[in-house]
Image (tube, rainbow, N blue to C red):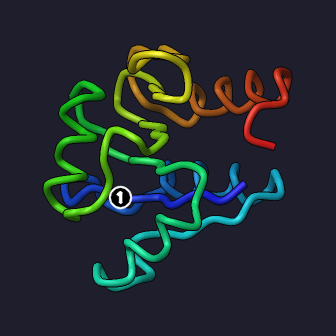
Amino acid sequence: MKYFVWISQETQYNDYTDEIIDFFWNNGNEVYISTNYQKTSYEQIIQKCNCIVLLDFRDVCFTKITSEFIDNVFIGNGQNNYLVFSNKGVYTSLIPSPYKIFHFNTLSKRNLSHFFIWCNRLQLFK
């Protein structure tokens, strides 16, 4: 699968960002990271991708994060598949409705590790 990873302006590139990107890459996926490209290239890249991964480690809801992405990048719509990592969990639009697929009280390396183990058991994102 191909993933476009967008790091929000409020989110600093950090260890969590690297761990999430590494997880997709290490599971045999193609990963495009927004910080590696000009905004003008996003549309072309997104058209090739199966899913847009939004990294925003604040306490905000799925709808707010996806709306900010669409407003900021001027690309994307309700037809895109989204996977959102926030401070309180992981959300997706891959199943009906924005749905929280994994909950944690706060984003930490330990909680990310639990999420990755859970994904591997279910063979998600491979």
Above or below: residue 39 compared with residue 64: below
Q: Mark 1 sits on what residue?
A: 7
Q: Based on the displayed image, in which of its 4 quarters is residue 71 positioned?
A: bottom left
**Which residue is depicted at the point 49% across and 48% down?**
16
Q: Residue drawn at (67%, 32%), measured in percent from left and top?
A: 113
Residue at the far front: name it.
79
Nearest the eye: 124 or 79:
79
Give residue 62's position: percent from left, percent from top.
30, 28
Quadrant of the frame with the N terminus: bottom right
What is the total number of numbered labels drawn onto the structure image?
1
Q: Is residue 28 above or below residue 33?
A: above
Q: In screen coordinates, is 121 left or right of 72? A: right
Figure quadrant of the C terminus: top right
In this rendering, would 92 be left or right of 72?
Answer: right
Question: Percent from the top left, x then y, of residue 37?
Answer: 41, 83
Instruction: Name the residue nearer the viewer: 7 or 112.
Output: 7
* In front of the other: 77 or 103: 77
Callout 1 amino acid: Ile
Residue at the (55%, 29%) spot, across then down: 94
Q: Secondary structure at mark 1?
A: strand
Coordinates of residue 74 in the picture (x, y in percent): 19, 63
**Residue plotted at (50% across, 65% down):** 47
Q: Is residue 125 toward the left or the right of residue 83 in the image?
A: right
Residue 9: quadrant of the picture: bottom left
